[in-house]
Image (cartoon, helix red, strand yellow):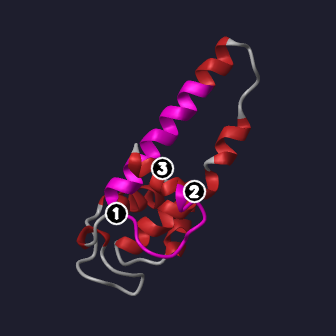
Amino acid sequence: MSWFIEALKKYAVFSGRARRKEYWLFMLFTWLIYIVLVAIGAAAHVPYLVGIAVVFLLPALAVTVRRLHDTGRSGWWILIGIVPLIGSIMLLVFYCSDSEAGANKYGPNPKETPAFA
């Protein structure tokens, strides 16, 4: 849960790097929250909750860009997701790839620095 909170604290920070753990745990908790709220909305006969997706849009975009930076790629690579099937597969490979060793042009390797002080 601390990784989710940490990513939310940096909700609009597009510089730097994000570890795989930070990225995947943020996405996991985001989807779990989304599923629970949609289920509650469906049980209470409330229309589709678009606001929930909007709340997590900017933090998800920021952590995704930082994850791409961690693999040594520009955040603009996120646009490859527009290409049907191939783009999504490429992004999944990038998200699962290990961090670039040492510092790169986006900052120091987050694996080499303590996450929480």
Residue 99 found in image quarter? bottom left
Q: CA distance from mark 2 to mark 1?
A: 22 Å
Report the number of numbered marks: 3
Where is mark 3, residue-wise?
Answer: 5
Image coordinates for residue 45, horizontal then vertical, percent: 73, 14
Image coordinates for residue 116, horizontal then vertical, percent: 34, 60
With 87 as the anchor, is 49 left or right in this view? right
Give, as a single range, the part of the protein colored magenta: 9-37
Query: Are dots 1 and 3 in contact, CB under 8 Å?
Result: no
Q: Residues within 10 Å of mark 1 (few under 14, many from 20)?
A: few
Q: CA distance from mark 2 to mark 3?
A: 11 Å
Magenta segment main secondary structure: helix
Query: Residue type at mark 1?
Result: Ala
> Upstream in the sequence, badge 1 or badge 3?
3
With 113 as the anchor, is 9 left or right in this view? right
Query: Which residue sits at x=58%, y=59%?
Result: 11
Q: Residues within 10 Å of mark 2 (few under 14, many from 20)?
A: many
In front: mark 2 or mark 3? 3
- Spot the residue most to the right: 47
Where is mark 1, residue-wise?
Answer: 117
Give SS at disc 3.
helix
Which label is found at residue 59? 2
